[in-house]
Amino acid sequence: MTSYLALLRAVNVGGKTTIGMADLRAMLGELGLAEPRSLLQSGNLLFRGDGTTPDELENLLAAETERRFGLKTDFFVRTADEWDAVVAGNPFPAEAGSDPGHLIVMALKEAPEAAAVAALQASIVGRETVRAVGRQAYLVYPDGVGESKLTIKRIEKALGTRGTGRNWNTTLKLQARVRE
C-alpha cells in the first residue's frame, strides 16, 4: 500500500469553507482508502491506498467532497516519498531552523515555468523570498504572512497554477505522520 497525504485548499480558515475532519476521514474510508487520519483542523489528511496516482486521487477527492458536502475545493495529493523530497528540497535550511513559522511550503497543481518564478521574484517589494522546486514553492515571510503583499492570489496568478501552503512546522509534522 502507498502512503499519501492530501492538503485541502482554504478550508476551516475564516469561517467561509468549513468541513469536519471526521467527515473527511469517513469519506476516505468509504472510498476504500485505508487508515484515514487528519492533522490539525486545516485540511491535512493522511491515508494509504492501492497505488492510485496522486492526480487521480486529487480528482476523486475533489469530486466526492463537492458531491457529498457541497464544498468545491482543491486537493493537493503527494505520496510519502514525494513529501520526503519536498522536505529534502527545501532551499531555505537556515530559515527552517531559525524561524520555521515564517517558512511556507506551497503545494502546487503544476510545476511553474522558470520565467514565471523569476517574474514573481522580481515583483516582490518586501523582504519575502520565493523559490520553486518542482510542484512546490518555498516562501520566506520574515515579517509574517499577515501583512505581506505577497498573497496566495498574487502567487497563483504569477505562477499560473493553484496552490495551498503549510508552514515548515506543519510540513515536518506531516512528514513524520504520513508513514505511521
Image (cartoon, rainbow, N blue to C red):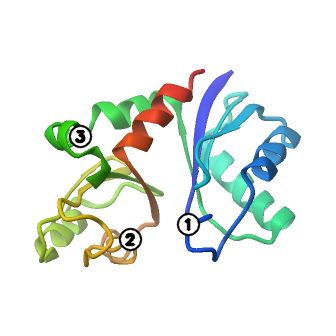
Mark sitting on residue 10: 1
Q: Would you place residue 33 above or below residue 100 in this image?
A: above
Counting other residues with Cα less than 10 Å from the Cα at mark 2, is it few (<14), some (14-19), or many (20 or more)?
A: some
Mark with earlier residue (3, 2): 3
Q: Which residue lies at the image location 81% right of the left edge and 52% below the top edge?
A: 23
* Direction from residue 152 to residue 7 in the image, left or right: right
Between 3 and 18, the one lying in front of the other is 18
Between 97 and 24, the one lying in front of the other is 97
Q: Which residue lies at the image location 76% right of the left edge and 50% below the top edge?
A: 24
- Which amino acid, mark 3? Ala
Q: Would you place residue 70 above or below residue 98 in this image?
A: below
Counting other residues with Cα less than 10 Å from the Cα at mark 3, is it few (<14), some (14-19), or many (20 or more)?
A: some
Q: Which residue lies at the image location 27% right of the left edge and 36% below the top edge?
A: 89
Mark sitting on residue 96: 3
Q: Is residue 146 something one can see in this rendering?
A: yes
Q: Is residue 103 something one can see in this rendering?
A: no
Counting other residues with Cα less than 10 Å from the Cα at mark 1, is it few (<14), some (14-19), or many (20 or more)?
A: some
- Which amino acid, mark 2? Ile
* Direction from residue 109 to residue 133 in the image, left or right: left
**Which residue is the site of mark 2?**
152
